[in-house]
Amino acid sequence: MLPLLLVAGTPLCSPAQLPSAPTPQTSATSGSISGFITDSDGDSIPAARVALTLESTSAAPLTAVTATDGGFTFAGIPPGPFKLSITATGFSPQQTSSELHSAESLDLPAIALNAASTTEISVTATQSEIAEAQVHLEEQQRVLGVFPNFYVSYVSDPMPLTPKQKYQLALHTLVDPVSFILNGVTAAAQQADNIYDWGQ
């Protein structure tokens, strides 16, 4: 056998035959997203629903509900663009979007919601309808709870009555039982004194 001679500084194998070092694998590091939901005056909105949609994936949105101070937090979120959809009772829905970087703890500015728009319906009664309501009130009026007091209005600016309403009020006064009794007593007194306003 021939002896194996080693020359100083000469490796046993060529550099091309040496095993290469493993290449480090870089992986994205998750982070967190935090924020507060307020109204237009800056007051916190508890129990608001916050939905987080990751735009780089097709995963279902993550949801969170704000605490009593209006705060919310999403943890373990992969980096990338995202969208927040906020809904709360009595407020208009709102959306906002941003981007989370690797290993970032993102604190969003306060998200202010606007109060939900309401539709006001104004119903105006006609003069005749207002006068009719006044007549109904007057027909309940009695002095000492007994004697009719239907022709007096305690409204500071009463609505004028139509001719029909005036006749109705007069008829209601005539057929009132107390009016019958008063007219009978007056007629009897005049008959006794021979005063014939009512005729013999």
Image (tube, helix red, strand yellow):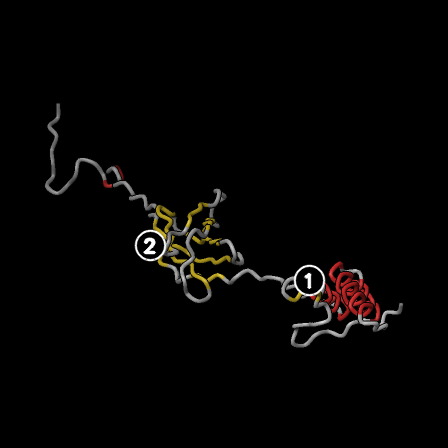
The residue lying furthest to the top in this view is 1
Number of marks present in the image shown: 2
x and y percentages locating residue 161 in the rendered image: 78, 72
Determine the residue positioned at 80% across, 60% down.
175
To which residue does mark 1 refer? 140
Pick out the residue farthest to the bottom.
157
Mark in front: 2 vs 1 = 1
Where is residue 124? Give x, y as percent: 71, 67
In the rendered image, which quarter contains the C terminus?
Answer: bottom right
Q: Is residue 41 left or right of residue 122?
A: left
Picture residue at 44% right of the left edge, 45% below the top: 62
Q: Height in image: 74 above or below 159?
A: above
Residue 159: horizontal and vertical position, in percent?
73, 74
Secondary-structure class at tag 1: loop
Q: Residue at x 11, y 39 (%)?
A: 7
Relative horizontal placement of residue 179, taking residue 88 as reference (left or right): right
Q: Quadrant of residue 92?
A: bottom right
Quadrant containing the N terminus in the rendered view: top left
Residue 68 image position (x, y, % from top left): 37, 53
Task: Pick the residue in front: 98 or 118.
Answer: 118
Report the side of 57 relative to 18 (left or right): right
Which circle's residue, 2 or 1, is located before the other in the chain?
Answer: 2
> Label 1 crowding class (10 Å Cα cut-off): few <14, some 14-19, many 20+?
few
Mark 1 is on which residue type? Gln
Q: Please say if the residues under marks 2 and 1 sit with CB atoms less than 8 Å apart.
A: no
Q: Which residue is more in the foreground, 164 or 91?
A: 164
Question: In the rendering, which numbered label is found on residue 104?
Answer: 2
Which of 52/87 is in front?
87
Please, what secondary structure does the residue beneath circle 2 have? loop
Corner quadrant of residue 8: top left
In this view, 71 is above or below 158:
above
Q: Amino acid at mark 2?
A: Glu
